[in-house]
Image (tube, rainbow, N blue to C red):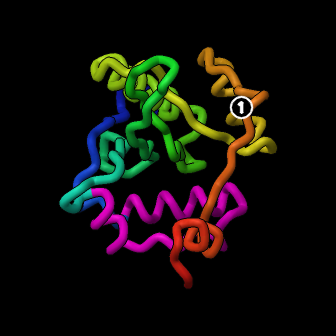
Amino acid sequence: MSNATVVLRTATEADVPAILSLIEALAGYERLRDQCVATEAQLRATLFGDRPQAEVLIAETATGEVAGFALFCSNYSTFLAQAGIWLEDLFVRPAFRGQGIGKALLRHLASLAVQRGCGRVEWAVLKWNTPSIGFYESLGANGLGEWTTFRLTGNALAALGGETR
């Protein structure tokens, strides 16, 4: 399959089961399946509800088979004084890798960033995921080696936010 047979489109609410399937496959690939608690109901509410929190691009074959996705949202750079795009997840099913789908998704996302006047596109990658790191570097992306990602979740988030669980 070449790039010409891949269709990129904005996800709709009807894609929620496919999106969840891709998220679960990604969680398995990243060895984080035990952390994946997303449900179709949560995805419907957060992606297609009154206040969508993120957007999804779907990559599918000419026959309509879902091959991959990119899930992203807006962020903001105080140093640039510009909006940006945070790529939360990019995943291509193993059977479709090496066919330009990941590059097509990132190219489309970069195009959206330019159209929207964004200053950058950012994402995180697990340190052990050398195939992805090599791929991103081949596109001109740079790792931010001096930055460490921190996360508050669960009980720690609730405690800091003044809530108890």
Q: Position of residue 137 (x, y in %)?
A: 68, 21
Q: Magenta segment range?
A: 18-47
Residue found at x 38% / y 27%: 83
Residue found at x 38% / y 61%: 18
Q: Position of residue 80 (x, y in %)?
A: 47, 17
The picture quadrant where one finds residue 13 is bottom left
Q: Determine the residue located farthest toward the right in the rendered image.
A: 128
Residue annotated with mark 1:
133
Residue found at x 71% / y 27%: 144
| Image-based side of 133 in relation to 154, left or right | right
| Image-based side of 58 in relation to 36, left or right | left
Number of numbered discs: 1
| Image-based side of 109 in relation to 123, left or right | left
Going by the numbered disc 1, the residue's amino acid type is: Ile
Query: Which sits in the foreground, 31 or 7?
Result: 31
Query: Which sits in the foreground, 107 or 149?
Result: 149
Q: Determine the residue located farthest toward the front in the rendered image.
A: 162
Residue 60 visible in the current orientation: no
Query: Which sits in the foreground, 95 or 15?
Result: 15
